[in-house]
Amino acid sequence: MTKLLHLDASPRGARSHTRSLTGDFVTRWVRQRSDVSVARRDLGCQPPPHLTEGWIAAAFTKPEERTPQMLADLALSDELVDELLGTDVLVVGVPMYNFGIPAMLKAYIDQIVRVGRTFSFDPELADPYAPLLPPGKRAFFIVSTGDSGYQPDGPLAGLNQVEPYLRTVFGFIGIEDLQFVYVGNDEFGGERLSESLAAARDRVAELTA
Ligand SMILES: Cc1cc2nc3c(=O)[nH]c(=O)nc-3n(C[C@H](O)[C@H](O)[C@H](O)COP(=O)(O)O)c2cc1C
């Protein structure tokens, strides 16, 4: 069985382009394959909590030395890491906020980038860091923006802190196979937006085929 994890980071409901496109992606993916299970997390409406001093102390304490309080502080993080470890395909809706990812998605990433669980650190090695996620996972990010042209060959690529960051952080834990779909022009509306949405839907159809 293939396991798909569907994450949405927009706090908007029906007006969210990323939600609409991730929904389309997951529907198409499941329709065209047998034996797919889908897990879903609504980070936009129910974001994971920010890290605390207790969380940090617990994460950097050896597992066998953790107190019951430390285990409780890491419980949600462990649940999210376990879920990601068992995921084959990640589909994430990402609104661009102030040129970067929304805080709700950053809160999730802070919970899943864990020493000893999703990456290792050995100060004795020339390259002290190694990813711990098993190979073969794929991730699809659907990014929506108010303006347009943020894709790597676009005129606003230099302002895009979404794709470079997501490639860095997911590569760090072991997901290298990342695809990005962009929809732009939410702030302009009209034909510019509808053309961009149509192109994004076509790209979703290609990627899910
Ligand atoms: C707080 C906030 C910050 C935003 N920052 C940017 C930005 O830096 N660049 C941009 O092109 N659009 C920006 N936008 C527009 C959103 O990226 C756009 O509305 C997008 O469609 C949101 O995703 P959603 O439709 O899934 O909610 C911003 C919107 C909000 C609410």
Image (tube, grey):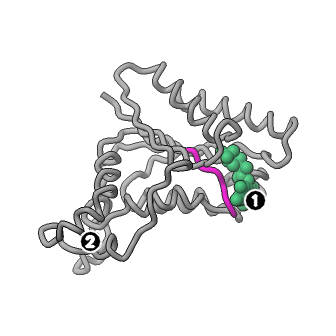
Q: Give me the C-alpha separation between circle 2 and circle 1.
A: 40 Å
- Of helix, strand and loop, which one carries label 1? loop
The residue that appears at 42% across and 21% down in the rendered structure is 33
Which amino acid does the dot numbered 1 rest on? Leu
Q: As drawn, is 196 to the left or to the right of 9? A: right
The residue that appears at 26% across and 62% down in the rendered structure is 72
Where residue 15 sits in the image (x, y, percent)? 71, 39
Q: Nearer the viewer, residue 137 or 81?
A: 81
The residue that appears at 23% across and 68% down in the rendered structure is 69
- Of helix, strand and loop, which one carries label 2? helix
Q: As drawn, is 69 to the left or to the right of 140? A: left
Q: Which residue does the numbered mark 2 point to in the structure image? A: 58
Q: Nearer the viewer, residue 156 or 1?
A: 1
**Is residue 201 within the magenta segment?**
no
Give the farthest residue toward the bottom.
Answer: 124
Residue 11 against residue 198 in the figure, above or below: below
Q: Residues within 10 Å of mark 1 (few under 14, many from 20)?
A: few
Which amino acid does the dot numbered 2 rest on? Ala
Q: Residues within 10 Å of mark 2 (few under 14, many from 20)?
A: many
Q: As drawn, is 100 to the left or to the right of 166? A: right
Q: As drawn, is 170 to the left or to the right of 125? A: right
| Mark whose residue sits in front, 2 or 1 | 2
Give the farthest residue toward the left.
Answer: 64
- Residue 192 seen in this snapshot: yes
Q: Which residue does the numbered mark 1 point to in the structure image? A: 156
- Residue 182 seen in this snapshot: no
Name the image quarter holding the N terminus.
top left
Residue 33 against residue 203 in the figure, above or below: above
Residue stretch rendered in magenta on the structure: 93-98
Where residue 148 sits in the image (x, y, percent)? 77, 50
Q: Is mark 1 within 8 Å of ligand 1?
A: yes
Name the quadrant containing residue 130: bottom left
